Amino acid sequence: MTERPHPRPDTAIDRERLEQTLGDPALARVVTRLRDRLGRDSDLSPPLRLSDPPEDERRALESILGMRHRRGATLTFSPKTLDATLRQSGISPGGLVVALEALGGALRDPRDEATRYAKAWDDAVAPTRIWIAKQDTDARRTALTSWLQDLISEGLLKRLATIPENAVQLLAQSQRVIDRLPAASWTLPELAARSVGDAHALDSGQALATLVQRAIGRLTHRKDNANTSDISDATDTSDATDTSDAAGRRRLWRRVHVSVDALSASVLTLGLRGVSDGLVDRTLAIHAEANTPCRLTEDALLHHPPRFSADVTGARVFVCENPAVIAAARREVDADALLGPLICTEGQPSTAVRLLLDNLSTAGIAIHVHADFDAAGAQIVALIVARHGAKPWRFDAESYRHALSVVKEAGIDPTSLPLQTASGRPHDKTESPLLAAMQSVGAIIHEELLIETLLRDVAMPTRPHDR
């Protein structure tokens, strides 16, 4: 890097007057331009032109030079004249360069600065390039090379790390995590703690999590890596590169045998029965016999997947959004009513919900889904319809208008319930008539107001397993 030798401090420089003149904030642009110019070339002769000078900048420069400049779109002055003025006035006997260095340190060629900056980033990723070269398979080397190139070309590494020193640490931590994949059926906090000593380092939104997820996406992407048996779960054919939502991130981590929230993510059921003697099937049967809601964790569904059939489970199941529907159905069952199987998402569907519905749809069980009449509810229904081939259950424009009449009969003014705007676009154009009706009225209708109507649909003449 080219750098001028820093001059010996000149005690004759008038620091106070220098700060009042060339150090005036109004001249910040002038000082920057002068430092860049003289850092590249010490010749003071070429004039310096400034476009669209603000009035305070013009006045400050004129005050130093003791002359007025012609008004116009540009302001042109001679650095050589400014140098002479600073010398003759005694503000900076050593001239302009000494004054600039007194204000802001040694002058540097900005081209050298750019080169130094680029080299610092190259040096930051160099250890990772070496690590990639040492990977034991061509597939891993290819995938991880693409991963690193993506981080650099997209500017993601710079955005997350901000400075090269941080990038060195972040990439080193990424290497330690990736080296442990696929994991030994660890939870995400376990992987983070074992890899970098911080159980929360791989939490959603953390910089390290973002880098590692991108690496997993490359390592497990079938198009990029035909032989993925060393890193991923070959039985998972879902799109593992979509991390735009929590479900996508869970699927991605699961492909490398890492559980995000296998114990906390769950699904609530009532009256659901399986056909095998596996753990989940037996758990469902015990709860169904006791007319008691059953909560299944993602972990249980992953390790003990249930099996279903129309003869035992029933030809269809009903999915709702709110546990109040399950609670009301439980009361009906206690009163000896016969109801079909119910599943509750408890808001946006978790991975546990998805796993259970996957098993049901695979068995040919028809899935009917309902939710609150609001933006979030519309998204839940559209998601389950798209993923599992479900059918909307009393969830269309006509059903919404009927629900409005039910609400009014209950003495509730629907206009007092403002419709919240959807955070994302509808998943399917078939939602449009419903959303148009909801937006026209501008009212939310919660499932809790429609429980009686919903439970009438769930009523069954006989239980499937009693036939």
Image (spheres, rainbow, N blue to C red):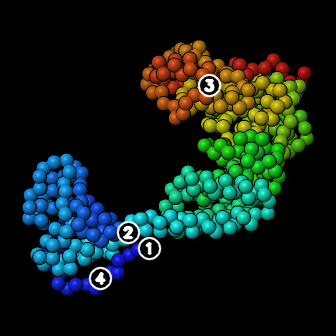
Quarter of the image for residue 309 reads top right
Q: Is residue 127 above or below residue 29?
A: below
Q: Picture coordinates of residue 303 (x, y %)?
A: 82, 48
Residue found at x 24% / y 63%: 46
Amino acid type at circle 3 is Asp
Q: Are marks 1 and 2 in contact (CB under 8 Å)?
A: yes
Secondary structure category for the residue under label 2? loop
Which residue lies under the disc numbered 3?
Answer: 428
Q: Picture coordinates of residue 112 (x, y %)?
A: 43, 68
Q: Picture coordinates of residue 142 (x, y %)?
A: 73, 55
Q: Which mark is residue 7?
A: 4
Q: Is residue 370 visible?
A: yes
Amino acid type at circle 4 is Pro
Q: Are marks 3 and 2 in contact (CB under 8 Å)?
A: no
Nearer-N-terminus badge (1/4): 1
Nearer-N-terminus badge (3/1): 1
Quarter of the image for residue 188 reads bottom right
Residue found at x 78% / y 20%: 460
Would you call the spot at circle 1 few (<14 residues within 10 Å), some (14-19), or many (20 or more)? Answer: few
